[in-house]
Each structure stands twice: as structure tokens, then as C-alpha cells.
Image (spheres, rainbow, N blue to C red):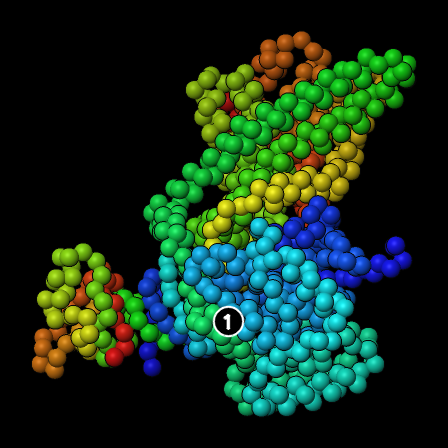
């Protein structure tokens, strides 16, 4: 039976906020894989479903308003369609946002690729009193148009039937003609003829290729520069563009968009008999409260506070539960006879290196789940765009947009999901800058260290002040580093900020859970190896040679700590604590435990009180606050940025800032007369 | 030719052209914000920025006012305070907003919906209006001007 099955590729293309992910999940179920588009930080999702005799590979293209290289997402879509065109395009429209969505639909129609259009959110449109004339749309677009409700699955069978029909008979489509001013039509036709004569070109309609070239941007995505004659065509396009602009008196991009959206407006009017009123009463009332000039921000902070509380109330106890399960497993393994028979070093490697590393990875699962459930509820409900609206002015000062604030704030719960969450940000620049700033937010693991140490070293009232000071320091570090990164233009050029305010929606449970599951899988696949390697390296440092106690003066770490004394002496940090900082690379929680081991057991609190002065302790805490958060954060930064340079920069800036700040604290304190 | 209106909530204007051909312009064009489209300023962020802009038939969009600076938009209607002092000329009162006392006082000047008036150059930050040829000049402060909705006559 498999011999008759044919595989076809369908690309799902839509502008943002059309319910694309919901439709993708509905069509493919859990049969999907998440990766990245080559060399960029944008997620690439591919899923599969069966359609009669066909195996359909569904490629989820990033949300794009247009086939042109203005944003990273759009560049990906353009490159994909031009260089590896799919068999069929499935274009999704939001019934209440037809005008804007049709801009892309018309470009897709001009490409000559067989296309099926699905109009989503028909239920919400009906509720708003919108009656959409699907037949009129289909007639004018010359392609099948299917009304659907992706959330409930309504119309999906008809959509599949339409897809199948187009796969089998792609020739029945007759794309519409968009009318341009005569000079444009003429120049496009002549340029199209030249493109047609090229030995090699994208298998799309030559008029669309001509239009793309005439825009004078990203030609290399459209025509392979290695094809003989392509350079001449690109030059000719530039010449013809000047001819057009001389006649129309405006940039060609404007003319092009005007014609396309005039057609889109006409179509939308024809299909709805009037331009729909997009804002419904409920959304208006919600926005009036949530975006209120005075109450909007306090409400936002209240919501974020509740979110962090949920992470603390559910995420961390779950993490602790998994940790203790793992500790039980560890105890059981340690008692196991075959393992006891192994040479001590090998046994220690297995238990303190590998098993401990796996433990670090696994204990993140519940936290990631809670975190991404909350994150996708925020995203799916439409609130995240509102939050971005409220915070944009402040974050703009750091060269970021308002959304990035949420990542940095959630970093105060845990840095790892906060770094992974940078994927929702809107440009490469914002993602890179945000993931460089997140590690300075004081996460719960660091808080544990600070609470423990400050309780030993300071009187209760002073300890509270110290904790407050550390939070303030963390905030200050985010702002200062943000300003420096902005001045240095790390992360490239910022893109202009344009954000649609999507309607409010109740998030779908299924989508929310699927998202949490996918994030855990992505973490496991992309970050786990690096985390495990990091833990093993730390094991190696602290457990070799085997004939001395772990972490003691004789181990590699002990010797390294002693030879680094010249760096840490000015900070008031003894070599024992330097070793604890190395342990802290695995996870901040274990800093305390490792100190107990390094100091050779006994009452840790008493030993610390005896060995460390309050000022030295403060310097140690400042260093802990700012230096590399943990191996899992570093691994996530590497996985998200796909760049060792960014990863190295993150580690380097953390260490440098930590050293500098600790130096200032310790030496400043001594000048003031503290010990 | 009216000067560029201030982006005050309630202002409606029609895009005439984009001052330049930069990345922002391209991006605006791609989401269907083209010359001839009527925009409505819905609200501004808590610190005066960004700006929510609504347009017919499609979801509203959030933009930064700095990035909108080069956009030329013809004033269609909106609060008088959205007009810069240089935007002298004939206007018509479209609506009065605000509390009863304010509306009664403004109506007392003769500024009722439908009435036309001439906008004179401002003086000391106050808007100066003349309703009839011999009528006395009415002065309005920013707060009052923000609640007087006008359109070009």
C-alpha cells in the first residue's frame, strides 16, 4: 500500500495573529517537530498528516505580512518560497482582519503556486455580526476558499477536501490580476520576459519575480547570483525602477503596496459588504481598563506578581519533589552492589558526574512546564501585546521593546525558561539583547544562597536590607548592561517597532499543553548535552585526583582556586569560596552544599561565621549575583542564539561585571572601615 | 494644507505620504498602511508612548511616535488640541466632550456642534478662535481644547 502513497509539501502561510498555530496543531496533532530555520533564531515547525493517498508534510512558515525581506521572519518566507517552493500553499486569513491578510494572499496568488485559502475565526466574525461572502472571495481570488473555525475544528474536513482537490488538479486555479499603473505593467512585463530567458530561476510566476526585483531589496533571495545573466537582470530592474519612479513620483515600494492593498480593500468590501468594525465591545472595555494611562501599569505589575507567585507556589515545589525523587534514586544507586564494586573514581564519575548532570536537566522539567503554560496563556489571551504596549516606553530606553520586559521579569523566577522565552520577541536584535540581560535577574536559586548566607552573617534587620540591596543591584545591572549593549549595538540594528493588537481570546488548553511539552522536548534535545558536559567538567575539576576529598585543596579545583587567588584576593573571596563558585556553575542551589563539603563537614554556619567577615560575605554574594548564572542558562543561550559568540559574551560580561562589582564593594567597604 | 496633527487620542487623519523610504515605511506599507488610509489615534502608552492607531477593517497597530515623525497625515477630525498653533484656518465644531459644566461654558461661547469658526495664531499657548466676523476672540486653554472635537470646514 505504501507504494501508492505520494508525499506532498504544503506550506502554511499567514500574517501574525490569525490562529496559524491552532490550525497547525489541529491538522497535524502531535506529529510535529520543532527546529530552527537555517542559521537564525526563528522556530521552524514541520508536521505531518494523511490526506487520502497523500502524506502531507505541513511546513509552518513564520508569520509574515508580505513576501519581502523587511523582517527576519519575512526573509525566511521569501527565501523558502523562492528557493524551495512547496507543492501547495495553505493561506490562512482572520475573518475580522481580511484587509490586512489579503495583502499576503494576493502576493501568494500572483506567485502562481497552487493555493488554498482558509478563512479562520468565522464564529467570532458571526458573533460580531459579520457575514462573509466566501463565494465572492473564491470567485475573485480564483482559488478555493474554505470557512473554518480552527479552535473547534469546524470546516477542517472541507479544507482537507479542498487541499486534496488542488493537489490533484492544480491547473484549475486562475489567479486574479492586480491592476497597476500602465508604466508599472509595462516595465514588469518587459522585466518578466528577461527573467523568463534566464537559464535558471525560481519556478514562480515571472511577474511576481519581476515585482520582487523591482523593489530593489534582497535580490539575492530571489535570484541566485551564480546564475549567468542574473546580475544583468538585477541591474536592469534597478534601471526600470527609476523609470517607474520618475513617472509615478513616489517610491516603487509605495506604488506596489498601494495597488495590492487597494485590491485587498476592494475584495474585503466585496466579501463583507462593508469594512468590518474590528473592535468589539468587550475588547474595548477590557482595553479601557488594562491599558488605562494610570491603572494599566499597576494592573500589569499585579498580573506579573501573580504569575511569579504561581511559579513559586507550583513550579518550585514541583522542582523540589523531582529533586527528592532524584535524590532517592541516587541513594538507591549508591547502595547498589555492582556499582559499589566499581573503582571509586569511576563510581564517582557515574554518580556525581553523569547522574547528577541528568538530575540537573530533569529537575528543570516541572519548572519549564509551569513557566510555559503561563507564558502561552499570556500569549494566547492577547495580553502579552498589551503588556508590551504598557512597558514599551521604558524598555525602549534600553533599545528593547516592551515584550522583553516580561522575559527579564520572569528571569527573577528562573533564568532558563526566561531565556527560552525570548523566542516570542519580534526581532533578532531584541532576542539577542534580551537573552544577554536575563542572566542578571536574581533567580530563586541565587535567592536561596543569599538568604542562607545573609542569615548567618548579618543581624535579621540588616539581612533584609542586604537582600533588598541585592535585588536593587540586579535591577541596576540589567539597566546598565542594557545601556552598554545598546551603545555598542550588540545584536545588530534594531527593527522598527510595529505591533498588532490582537483581539482577546481564551487560550486553548490543548495548545497551551502542547507548547509546554514542546518546550521541554526542545530543552532536552538542545540544551541537555551542554548541561551534562558542564556538570562533568565541574566533576572533573572537583573530584580529580581521587585520593583527596572532593573540592579540597588537592583537587584540580582546589589548585585552580589557589592559583586564581590573585584575582579573588582583592574581592575578599578565599580559595574555598572560589571552588564553591565553580560548583555554582552547575546550579546556584548547590553552592551552599558544596561549601559544606569543601570546608570538610561539620557545622557549616559556624565555620562560615568564623572564616568569613560580613563584608567578605557581601562581596561573595555580589559575585554570585552577577557571574554566569548556571550551566543550564548558558546552554539555553547557546541553544536559542545558535551562536557561541553570544554565549561567550554572556559568560564573559557576567564574570567581568561580577569581578568589578565585588571589587568595588569589598575595597569600598574596607575604605569605609569595615573588615 | 494643514500642518501635521499632534497624535492625541481621538484624532483622525488621512495619510498623505511617508516622508522617506526607510525600513519603517516599508514595514507600514506591508501591513496595509498606505497613502489614503484613515487613521484614528486610540490611546497613548502610560509615558506618552507608544501610540495605538486604529484603521478601518483591520486590527489596530501600536507604533512609536518617534517612528511616526516622518508620516504626513491630513487632519480629518479630532480634539482642537491635536492641531498645532500653525494650523490656522476654518474649522467646524463636531462635538463637545467632558463634563456638563465644561460643555455649558464652551457652548456659551457659541461653540455648538455644527458651528464654524476661524482658528487664529495662538498666543501664550492658548488657542484663539473667532466665531463670526465681528464676534470677540475666544481663548481656550489646552485642557478645554482637548475636549472640543473639530473638523476642517
The answer to whether one can see residue A608 in this image is: yes
Along the horizontal axis of the image, is B130 left or right of A602?
left
**Up/down of B3 relative to A632, above or below:** below
**Up/down of A51 relative to A569, above or below:** below
The residue lying at 67 percent from left, 16 percent from top is: A596
Judging depth in this view, the residue of B123 and A124 nearest the camera is: A124
Task: For the N terminus of chain A, give its image quadrant.
Answer: bottom right
Which chain is home to disc 1? A
Along the horizontal axis of the image, is B78 left or right of B15?
left
The residue lying at 33 percent from left, 67 percent from top is: B11
The residue lying at 12 percent from left, 71 percent from top is: B110
Along the horizontal axis of the image, is A153 left or right of A1?
left
**Up/down of A625 relative to A14, above or below:** above
- Tell me where residue B56 appears, x and y as whole percent: 43, 68
The answer to whether one can see residue A392 in this image is: no
Q: Helix, strand, or loop for circle 1?
A: helix
- Tell me where residue A531 appears, x and y as whole percent: 74, 35
Task: For the C terminus of chain A, give its image quadrant.
Answer: top right
Q: Which residue is mark 1?
A: A271
The residue lying at 84 percent from left, 14 percent from top is: A336
Judging depth in this view, the residue of A615 and A465 nearest the camera is: A465
- Tell me where residue A193 appears, x and y as whole percent: 74, 87
Along the horizontal axis of the image, is A601 left or right of A334?
left
Amino acid at each position: 500500500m505504501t507504494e501508492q502513497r505520494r508525499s506532498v509539501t504544503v506550506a502554511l502561510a499567514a500574517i501574525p495573529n490569525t490562529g496559524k498555530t491552532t490550525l497547525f496543531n489541529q491538522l497535524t496533532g502531535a506529529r510535529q517537530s520543532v527546529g530552527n530555520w537555517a542559521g537564525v533564531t526563528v522556530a521552524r515547525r514541520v508536521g505531518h498528516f494523511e490526506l487520502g493517498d497523500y502524506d502531507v508534510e505541513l511546513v509552518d512558515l513564520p508569520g509574515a505580512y508580505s513576501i519581502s525581506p523587511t523582517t527576519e521572519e519575512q526573509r525566511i518566507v521569501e527565501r523558502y518560497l523562492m528557493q524551495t517552493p512547496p507543492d501547495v500553499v495553505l493561506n490562512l486569513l482572520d475573518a475580522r482582519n481580511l484587509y490586512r491578510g489579503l495583502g499576503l494572499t494576493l502576493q501568494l496568488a500572483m506567485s502562481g503556486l497552487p493555493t488554498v485559502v482558509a478563512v479562520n475565526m468565522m464564529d467570532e466574525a458571526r458573533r460580531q455580526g459579520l457575514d462573509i461572502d466566501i463565494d465572492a472571495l473564491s470567485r475573485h481570488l480564483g482559488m478555493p476558499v474554505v470557512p473554518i473555525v480552527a479552535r473547534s475544528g469546524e470546516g477542517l474536513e472541507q479544507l482537507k477536501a479542498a487541499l486534496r482537490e488542488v493537489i490533484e488538479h492544480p491547473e484549475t486555479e486562475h489567479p486574479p490580476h492586480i491592476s497597476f499603473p500602465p508604466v508599472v505593467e509595462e516595465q514588469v512585463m518587459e522585466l518578466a520576459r528577461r527573467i523568463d530567458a534566464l537559464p535558471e530561476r525560481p519556478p514562480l510566476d515571472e511577474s511576481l519575480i519581476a515585482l520582487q526585483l523591482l523593489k530593489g531589496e534582497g535580490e539575492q533571495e530571489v535570484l541566485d547570483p551564480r546564475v549567468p545573466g542574473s546580475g544583468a537582470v538585477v541591474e536592469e530592474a534597478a534601471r526600470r525602477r527609476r523609470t517607474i519612479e520618475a513617472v509615478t513620483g513616489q517610491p516603487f515600494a509605495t506604488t506596489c503596496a498601494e495597488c495590492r492593498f487597494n485590491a485587498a480593500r476592494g475584495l474585503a468590501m466585496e466579501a463583507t459588504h462593508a469594512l468590518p468594525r474590528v473592535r468589539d465591545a468587550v475588547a474595548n472595555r477590557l482595553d479601557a481598563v488594562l491599558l488605562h494611562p494610570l491603572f494599566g501599569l499597576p494592573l500589569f505589575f499585579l498580573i506579573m506578581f501573580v504569575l511569579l507567585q504561581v511559579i513559586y507556589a507550583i513550579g518550585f515545589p514541583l522542582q523540589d519533589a523531582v529533586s527528592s525523587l532524584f535524590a532517592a534514586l541516587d541513594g538507591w544507586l549508591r547502595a547498589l552492589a555492582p556499582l559499589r564494586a566499581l573503582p571509586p573514581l569511576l563510581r564517582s564519575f557515574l554518580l556525581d558526574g553523569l547522574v547528577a548532570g541528568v538530575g540537573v536537566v530533569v529537575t528543570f522539567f516541572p519548572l519549564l512546564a509551569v513557566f510555559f503554560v503561563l507564558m502561552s496563556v499570556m500569549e494566547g489571551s492577547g495580553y502579552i501585546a498589551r503588556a508590551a504596549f504598557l512597558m514599551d516606553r521604558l524598555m525602549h530606553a534600553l533599545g528593547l521593546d516592551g515584550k522583553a520586559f516580561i522575559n527579564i521579569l520572569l528571569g527573577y523566577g528562573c533564568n532558563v525558561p526566561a531565556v527560552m522565552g525570548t523566542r516570542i520577541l519580534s526581532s533578532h536584535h531584541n532576542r539577542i539583547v534580551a537573552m544577554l540581560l536575563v542572566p542578571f535577574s536574581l533567580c530563586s536559586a541565587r535567592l536561596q544562597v543569599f538568604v542562607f548566607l545573609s542569615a548567618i552573617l548579618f543581624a535579621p534587620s540588616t539581612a533584609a536590607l542586604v537582600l533588598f540591596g541585592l535585588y536593587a543591584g540586579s535591577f541596576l545591572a540589567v539597566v546598565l548592561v542594557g545601556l552598554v549593549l545598546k551603545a555598542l549595538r550588540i545584536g545588530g540594528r534594531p527593527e522598527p517597532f510595529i505591533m498588532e493588537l490582537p483581539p482577546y481570546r481564551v487560550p486553548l488548553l490543548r495548545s497551551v499543553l502542547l507548547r509546554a511539552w514542546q518546550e521541554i522536548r526542545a530543552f532536552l534535545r538542545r540544551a541537555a548535552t551542554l548541561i551534562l558536559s558542564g556538570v562533568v567538567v565541574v566533576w572533573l575539576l572537583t573530584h580529580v585526583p581521587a585520593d583527596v576529598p572532593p573540592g579540597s585543596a588537592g583537587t584540580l579545583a582546589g589548585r585552580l582556586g589557589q592559583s586564581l587567588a590573585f584575582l579573588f584576593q582583592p574581592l575578599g573571596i578565599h580559595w574555598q569560596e572560589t571552588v564553591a563558585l565553580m560548583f555554582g556553575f552547575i546550579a546556584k542551589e548547590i553552592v551552599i552544599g558544596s561549601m559544606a563539603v569543601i570546608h570538610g563537614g561539620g557545622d557549616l554556619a559556624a565555620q562560615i561565621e568564623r572564616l568569613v567577615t560580613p563584608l567578605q560575605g557581601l562581596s561573595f554574594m555580589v559575585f554570585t549575583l552577577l557571574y554566569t548564572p548556571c550551566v543550564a542558562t548558558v546552554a539555553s543561550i547557546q541553544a536559542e542564539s545558535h551562536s557561541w559568540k553570544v554565549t561567550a559574551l554572556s559568560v564573559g560580561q557576567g564574570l567581568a561585571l561580577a569581578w568589578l562589582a565585588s571589587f568595588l564593594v569589598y575595597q569600598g567597604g574596607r575604605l569605609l572601615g569595615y573588615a | 494644507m494643514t500642518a501635521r496633527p499632534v497624535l492625541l487620542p481621538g484624532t483622525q487623519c488621512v495619510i498623505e505620504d511617508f516622508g522617506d523610504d526607510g525600513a519603517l515605511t516599508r514595514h507600514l506599507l506591508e501591513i496595509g498602511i498606505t497613502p489614503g488610509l484613515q487613521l484614528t489615534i486610540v490611546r497613548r502608552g502610560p509615558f506618552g508612548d507608544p501610540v495605538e492607531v486604529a484603521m478601518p477593517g483591520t486590527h489596530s497597530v501600536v507604533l512609536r511616535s518617534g517612528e511616526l515623525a516622518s508620516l504626513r497625515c491630513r487632519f480629518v477630525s479630532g480634539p482642537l488640541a491635536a492641531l498645532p498653533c500653525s494650523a490656522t484656518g476654518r474649522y467646524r465644531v463636531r462635538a463637545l466632550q467632558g463634563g456638563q459644566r465644561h460643555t455649558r461654558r464652551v457652548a456659551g461661547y457659541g461653540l455648538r456642534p455644527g458651528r464654524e469658526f476661524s482658528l487664529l495664531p495662538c498666543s501664550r499657548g492658548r488657542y484663539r478662535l473667532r466665531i463670526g466676523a465681528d464676534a470677540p476672540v475666544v481663548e481656550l486653554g489646552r485642557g478645554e481644547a482637548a475636549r472640543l472635537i473639530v473638523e476642517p470646514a
